[in-house]
Image (cartoon, coloured by chain):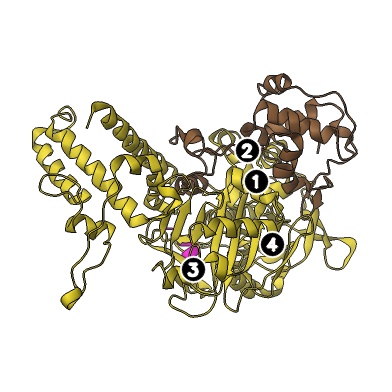
Amino acid sequence: MNRRSLFKLIGAVAGSAVMYHAMSELGHAAESGYTGPIELKGNPKDASVLILGAGLAGMSAALELRNAGYQVQVLEYNDRPGGRNWSLYGGDKYTELGGYTQDVQFAEGLYLNPGPWRIPYHHRALIDYCKRLKVQLEPFTQVNYAAYLHSSKAFGGKPQRYREVHADFNGHVAELLAKATHQNQLDQAVTREDREILLEAMREWGALDNNYEYKKGLLTSERRGYVSDPGGGLTSDPVFSDPIALSELMQSRLWRSIAAGHIYEFQNSIFQPVGGMGMIGKAFGRELGNLIRYNCKVTEIKQDERGVSVMYQDTKTGGAVRTAHADWCICTIPASILSQIPVTVGAPMKSAIDALYYDSSIKVGLQFKRRFWEQDESIYGGMSFTDQPNALIGYPNTGYFSDGPAVLLGAYTFGVNSFLYAAMSPEERVRKTVEYGSRIHPQYETEFQHGVAVAWHRVPWTLGCAGHWTPELRAKHFDDLCAIDGRIVLAGEHASRLPAWQEGALLSSLDAVRRLHERVLAA
Amino acid sequence: MHLSVDRPWVAMIAAAMVVGVAVTGAGIGDAQEIYAGAYPQKTGEELYQGICQGCHMPNAQGAVGAGAYPALAKDIRLAAGIYPLTVVLNGQRAMPPIGEDLTDEQVANVVNYIRTHFGNHYKDAVTPAAVKAARRVHEPAQEEM
């Protein structure tokens, strides 16, 4: 190997190391600050709180304040609890902005989670609420070694198994590092004593042979899989597989998909509610019962020294603007919506609300006649990644081995591709998603039955998937967004440092509740 | 859209994608090249139909839900080219700064398209040079939607 290709490789490796480092920084290395159910001591003396929005932030606030003795009322725009905690099932009807209506025709028990779909093990508040509300959780698979990595520009468009790319990437890098070590190129960085340990580590980590080479054979096939697995009796000879050559692997860029699974939020264990993410919102809704008033479109929020008045219209019956009054208000309306509603708050909070736009994201759920990914390709849950606009295919993490139809996540994108997707009609999004997916799974063409597409910029009650923060915006506006303004405090994922995560919505809400309660007791 | 360190969830998804998302931001230095996600549309019409109509709708009538996307049809606020130009570049409340991911030419084309279609008849075209100059202004647009 020449010096230049070594540098090239180290550049690639250093690149991902830098990325891991950055990721762990952004991953908020400290675990969720949640230490158990909030305790609100002291008598609120019938103080009333009006909560705007029945998502996880609003409903957790309602639950805790009700339990602490407050008079609570929740106003919700939708006709269901949950907000972005949401699953679409057969029989549901979803109308996005522009009036495009989709009749969901998934078979019984099948669903698409248009919003959040996984719960990291360290999202303790969310897991605790699931426990308290008796929402059953099951494992969610992030990394599946049998799933595919696909590039339309590499390997003639033929998808590669994750285990092959993963093993070969590690193996080649280990071999290169071992070579560099043997050639004394790392002497400045590695002591003589550590050198032997490093070599041993490279051999074990990369599946290198005694000559520190990553070569076709038992060792490497035990990582990347066989052409023909070891068997029994007279047909038992395994056929070893050929590693992908270093250059081809680097050029393919498929190694880029490996890093995701190392990220804190995507490490085992991860969970999902049995029956769909929306089960959490439903459970909160059952618990709160008629404390939530549905179909309410908030049109104005006013406050003075005596209390808060919220004007709203019933979206089903129309009619006159109604007014709800309370001593205090917790507003969880997304900033994208709240920025358009007249609200009497000071300039700092108003500027903070106006500073956040909401990101674009799309999800497409596809129902197929059978689980061909399991039956034909031994893929049970997890996800495949592609360079096509659909970005990934998420296989159902439940109901394994069952006959009959199943729904997979055919597309999940952010950024440019999700903007392009959002500008399409729902039918077109589904059609394109089937087209992209069929290049990875040709079975799509004969097995596809029905699709549903949710583009978050067209969701009538969020205008996007989550608030867009930058470090500059945080420094300028975050404290003002979270501070209590008179009798109003905001909560939601946008008022957290875990943007877009349900845990962020809950922690933001609990923090707001705690501060509000202190204020009430002091009043 | 430009990603930042402040959005781990998006960065994570982006890291999980081979291509397809335009990514910049700390820690993902060469991401623009890696996740080459430039908008392919060139003409104003292509850009409008490929991006803008996602929110402003195919007929530019906007849409109303819990919040609203403003109509661009017969929109007197488009009279001065600098207004739509500034909004496209900097965003405004719920509107993302979509122009960050478009070339000067693309921004000019789409601004000129909406100013001469959907019942708008403003013939004084915005030039790519004007877009380039306006990019230096970082203040968000001050006008109301």
* Rendered-image quadrant of the N terminus of chain A: top left
Label the magenta part by its dominant secondary structure. Answer: helix
Q: Which residue is mark 2?
A: B39
Q: Position of residue A470 (x, y in %)?
A: 56, 37
The answer to which of A221 and A347 lies nearer the viewer is A221
Mark number, residue A419: 1
**Above or below, comparing residue A263 to residue A111 in the picture:** above
Residue type at numbered disc 4: Ala
Q: Nearer the viewer, mark 4 or mark 2?
A: 2
Residue type at numbered disc 1: Phe
Marks 4/1 in contact by CB < 8 Å: the verdict is no
Taking A194 as reference, is A297 left or right?
right
The answer to which of A384 and A307 lies nearer the viewer is A384
Host chain of mark 4: A
- SS of the residue under disc 1: helix
Host chain of mark 2: B
Marks 4/2 in contact by CB < 8 Å: the verdict is no
Marks 2/1 in contact by CB < 8 Å: the verdict is yes
